């Protein structure tokens, strides 16, 4: 092996070691898309929302529970913003049928909030599709102190 070949091999090995020690950008991006969804066993629309999130590139762990009220209380979801399922990602709470694009924006901007919610079950929101009907709805951010604000409008 000539000197140039040896240097190239050493550089390649060094880069592999650096990636292993620091974590590859691909592995870090995949970790950032891991979502845990708590949902009722009797709710079909939650499964459709999970499908929407997976289609957007999120890895979803689905946890079926009969005590959604306890989950919402545990993670600080205000009663007025409640929906049928509650999800967690990177320290944020996602309540209800929030579009994947809003979750991606939340993760990108990292605002100082507890989470975001699509209150109720808006017709036409991800997982709540009914033909061509799409009702306007608002995704709301909420803080631990009870403050809320409009995060996104979907018309």
Image (spheres, rainbow, N blue to C red):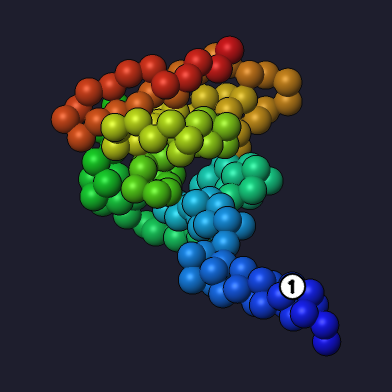
Q: Most extreme residue toward the left, as rendered?
A: 145
Q: What element carries label 1?
A: helix
Is any atom of residue 41 visible in this view?
A: no
Q: Return the residue at label 1.
A: 8
Q: Which of 107 and 37 is in front in this view?
A: 107
Q: Most extreme residue toward the right, as rendered?
A: 1
Kindly identify the residue that appears in the image at 40 percent across and 45 percent down: 86
Vertical position of residue 133 compared to residue 110: above or below: above
Q: Where is residue 149 in the image (x, y as percent from the top left)?
A: 32, 18
Graded by Cα atoms within 10 Å as few (under 14), some (14 to 19) or many (20 or more), the crowding at tag 1 reads few
The N terminus sits in image quarter: bottom right
Q: Most extreme residue toward the front, as rendered?
A: 3
Is any atom of residue 149 visible in this view?
A: yes
Kindly identify the residue that appears in the image at 24 percent across and 41 percent down: 76
Q: Nearer the viewer, residue 16 or 31?
A: 16
Kindly identify the residue that appears in the image at 34 percent across and 48 percent down: 91
Relative to residue 140, is residue 60 drawn left or right?
right
Vertical position of residue 1 compared to residue 128: above or below: below
Q: How many labels does the image show?
A: 1
Q: Where is residue 84 in the image (x, y as percent from the top left)?
A: 43, 40
- The quarter of the picture where residue 8 lies is bottom right
Kindly identify the residue that appears in the image at 67 percent across and 19 percent down: 133
Q: Position of residue 152 (x, y in %)?
A: 47, 19
The C terminus sits in image quarter: top right
Q: Position of residue 40 (x, y in %)?
A: 44, 52
């Amino acid at each position: 092996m000539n000197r140039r070949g040896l240097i190239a091999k050493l550089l390649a090995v060094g880069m592999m070691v650096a990636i292993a020690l620091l974590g590859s950008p691909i592995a870090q991006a995949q970790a950032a898309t891991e979502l845990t969804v708590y949902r009722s066993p009797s709710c079909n629309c939650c499964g459709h929302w999970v499908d929407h999130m997976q289609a957007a590139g999120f890895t979803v762990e689905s946890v079926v529970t009969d005590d959604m009220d306890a989950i919402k209380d545990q993670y600080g979801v205000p009663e007025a913003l409640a929906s049928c399922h509650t999800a967690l990602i990177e320290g944020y709470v996602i309540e209800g049928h929030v579009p994947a694009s809003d979750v991606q924006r939340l993760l990108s901007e990292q605002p100082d909030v507890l989470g975001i919610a699509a209150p109720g079950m808006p017709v036409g929101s991800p997982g709540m599709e009914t033909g061509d009907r799409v009702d306007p709805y608002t995704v709301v951010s909420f803080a631990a102190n009870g403050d809320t604000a409009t995060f996104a409008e979907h018309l």
